[in-house]
Image: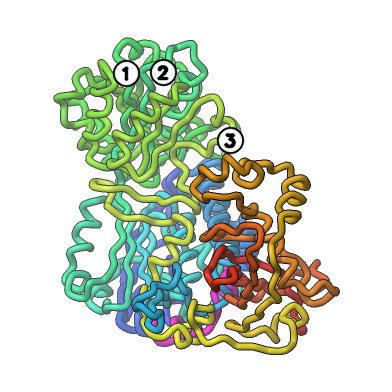
Amino acid sequence: MNIQSYITGAWFDGQSDGVPVVNAVNGDFIGTVSSAGMDFRDVLRHAREVGGPALRTLTFHERALRIKALAQYLLERKEEFYEVSAWTGATRTDSWIDIEGGIGTLFSYSSLVRREFPNETFLAEGEQERLSTEGTFTGRHILVPKEGVAVHINAFNFPCWGMLEKIAPSLCAGMPVVVKPATVSSYLTEKMARAIIASGLLPQGAFQLICGSTGDLFEHLMEQDVVTFTGSAGTGGKLKSHRSIVANSIPFNMEADSLNLSLLGETVTPDAVEFDLFIKEVVREMTVKAGQKCTAIRRAIVPADRVEAVTAALQQRLQRLPVGDPALDGVKMGPLVGRDQVDDVWENVSRLQRSCDILYGGDKEFAIQGSDRDKGAFFPPTLLYCHAPQTATEPHDIEAFGPVCTVMPYRDLDEALLLAKKGRGSLVGSIFTGDDAEARHIVLNTAAWHGRLLVINRDCAGESTGHGSPLPALVHGGPGRAGGGEELGGARAIKHYMQRTAVQGSPTTLMRLTGEYHQGAAPLTDPVHPFRKYFEQLQVGETYHSYRRTVTEADIVNFGCLTGDHFYAHFDELGARDSIFGKRVAHGYFLISAAAGMFVDPAPGPVLANYGLENLRFIEPVSSGDTIRVKLVVKQKVKKDKRPDDTRATGVVRWAVEIFNQHDKTVALYDIMTLVQRQHD
């Protein structure tokens, strides 16, 4: 059978003999992969002209809800993906990371977008920038979706997660995607892609799949496109320097394989909890996905006087780890993804032996369970030791992309830091120590060389997600050898697919353009109190001015007695005289409490709850005898999606609150958020 692509709204078969792909466990033929005859220009045109406009008409929240629904749809069919994933040599645990980990990323981004982004088609970022003396000329940054296509070129080791963790932020940003999986495991990506298409949840043209070569795809890339790549640094470098990428200044995000490390602290003794945690993590990262992870531990850096204890513990644990058919109970590690990969790992182990000794494994005659070693793509867990890592180059330059790790000693912490940096940039490093001062020293002196650093001790180990687990909220990528790019990282990933533009104009113009209130904009007034209005009736910029209130000695005393706040600036006449205020002043929290009483309408109405206060600043002191007033402005409105169990449809209204004194000087500024009922669902 042919592994098909999905382009321009239809499934596509290559027009010539393709590349054969086989079952990694037993060598059985699965199918052929080819993109011959594909019109790559038309693929990109379809994304730009059909998928892009359809996505850009949706708001962030509408896109996020479709992503959530897609995640639920895929999760309901996960067993179909597990069945095919086993053909790649993955154990159930390996497949869980790829399949449910990937689906979980969709859920995470859907939640993040609905929590942090407006229910709009664009994002107003940061605060306004005052650009003139009188405040009539101001500026603001906005982000809009790029009007091109996001091309995602993925590695073979995570056929599902690699696709999903990239398309989630792209689609949430409003940018259509073209996914290019690695050929050797593309059959699993195709399986999940069929479910994505069958769900009908994504607009036509928003998702396309190319199985096989990318042909002349890069020749047709344009200025509004984005390319992301995961794989070898060599291939990534060639693509990054393609003339279309360079000539059109196309953003190119690269995540390359790296020589990640795990460092055992100088203070950790063999009887410490952190020692056992280190051993378990190194073995786990050697053997999960058969070591075929871009984040796997390749270098284990340990104190010289603990090498014997470390290597003995690692060998003992590796001996208890059965290798074979992952479908069998008890098998903890399956094969590599294919025979070519086996040959590549053997070659690199041979190169590493120029300066390293094999302590465990490294023998082509090894036992496996439930399969034929000659038909499957099996490789034995292999542990090496480098006697002189300070001068040897191989363990810092050569990556055997399989279940292979090299132990290397250090004499003191300064030498450990130098060894850590010899990898020339990695995706992740882990530090095992119970000494926080030691951890601080290592982190601050190695962070420049790592995309992520994990510090493990007995306090956090129980809930730690582990060395090799990128998380949606944190950046995934690294400097130097690791590619110099960033993926994930929460909202950062979404913004990667958007154009940031500085917009300048009058505060009123920017308010109407962005849908958010800007200081100095022309106020909108209405005799109806804003708390009497439903969400739809409120207008951004609508302003309410309160009555005036004179602060009294009794106010200050009563508030202090009520709260127990008897700070000297409020109660000690002599102490306050020598303070920065020069006299007694009212509590800051009295001011915002009094302000609430001055702007609320007490009767039941559409305003249901106040659930947040942000950006509070006290500008000027207020004393007994001063008179205050409040200005309340509708700053922003965000329509909330009604959940099945909600009894009322609502929206969030952010109000800008400003408190003035009798001299019209601002004494306090802050935002409050209220939940306001909508008239219509």
Query: Which residue lies under the disc numbered 3?
Result: 463
Residue at the image point whose x is 14% and y is 25% from the top: 391
Q: Answer yes or no: do the residues labelled 1 and 2 have beta carbons within 8 Å?
A: yes
State the CA–CA distance, disc 3 to disc 2.
Answer: 26 Å
Name the mark on residue 92.
none
Secondary structure type for disc 3 = loop
Query: Which residue lies under the disc numbered 1?
Result: 359
Residue range in magenta is 46-68
For badge 3, the amino acid type reads: Glu
State the CA–CA distance, disc 1 to disc 2.
Answer: 8 Å
Quarter of the C terminus within the rendering = bottom right
Residue 54: in magenta span: yes
Secondary structure type for disc 1 = strand
For badge 2, the amino acid type reads: Gln
**With 237 as the anchor, is 44 left or right in this view?**
right
**Nearer-the-camera pick, 527 or 321:** 527
Q: Residue 114, position in %: x, y?
A: 59, 67
